[in-house]
Image (tube, rainbow, N blue to C red):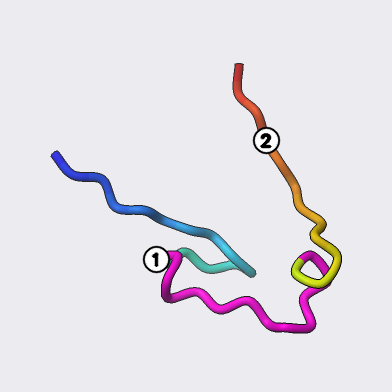
Amino acid sequence: MTYTELAYYNGEYGLPAELKIPIEERGFIFGEGVYEAVL
């Protein structure tokens, strides 16, 4: 079995290489992010 990477950005799913982050994105400019940890 093989696994394909899947990313979610701005309401859509896609391959990480296909999703584009606008240069004006606040998280891109200031390095902000949301993290989730599952223990």
The residue to which callout 2 is attached is 36
Q: Secondary structure at mark 1?
A: loop
Q: Quadrant of the C terminus?
A: top right
Q: Residues within 10 Å of mark 2 (few under 14, many from 20)?
A: few
Quadrant of residue 25 within the rendered picture? bottom right
Picture layout, residue 24 above or below residue 32: below
Q: Is residue 2 left or right of residue 7?
A: left
**Which image quarter: residue 6?**
bottom left
Q: Amino acid at mark 2?
A: Glu
Q: Is residue 5 left or right of residue 30?
A: left
Q: Using the image, determine if residue 25 lies above or below residue 27.
A: below
Which residue is more in the foreground, 7 or 30?
Answer: 30
Q: Based on the picture, tell me whether residue 21 belongs to the magenta stretch.
A: yes
Q: Residue beneath label 1, please?
A: 15
In this view, 1 is above or below 31: above
Left or right: 28 in relation to 7:
right
Secondary structure state at the residue bearing disc 2 = loop
Q: Residue at x 82, y 72 (%)?
A: 29
Task: Name the residue rendered at 39%, 66% in the picture.
Answer: 15
- Give the number of the disc on residue 31: none
Q: Nearer the viewer, residue 33 or 10?
A: 33
Q: Which residues are magenta?
A: 16-27
Q: Residue 15 lies in magenta, yes or no?
A: no
Q: Residue 26: percent from the left, percent from the top?
A: 83, 71
Q: Magenta-highlighted stretch: main secondary structure?
A: loop
Residue 10, position as x, y percentages in the image: 64, 69
| Image location of residue 36, percent across then percent down | 67, 35
Q: Is residue 5 left or right of residue 13?
A: left
Please, what is the three-letter code of the amino acid marked with disc 1? Leu
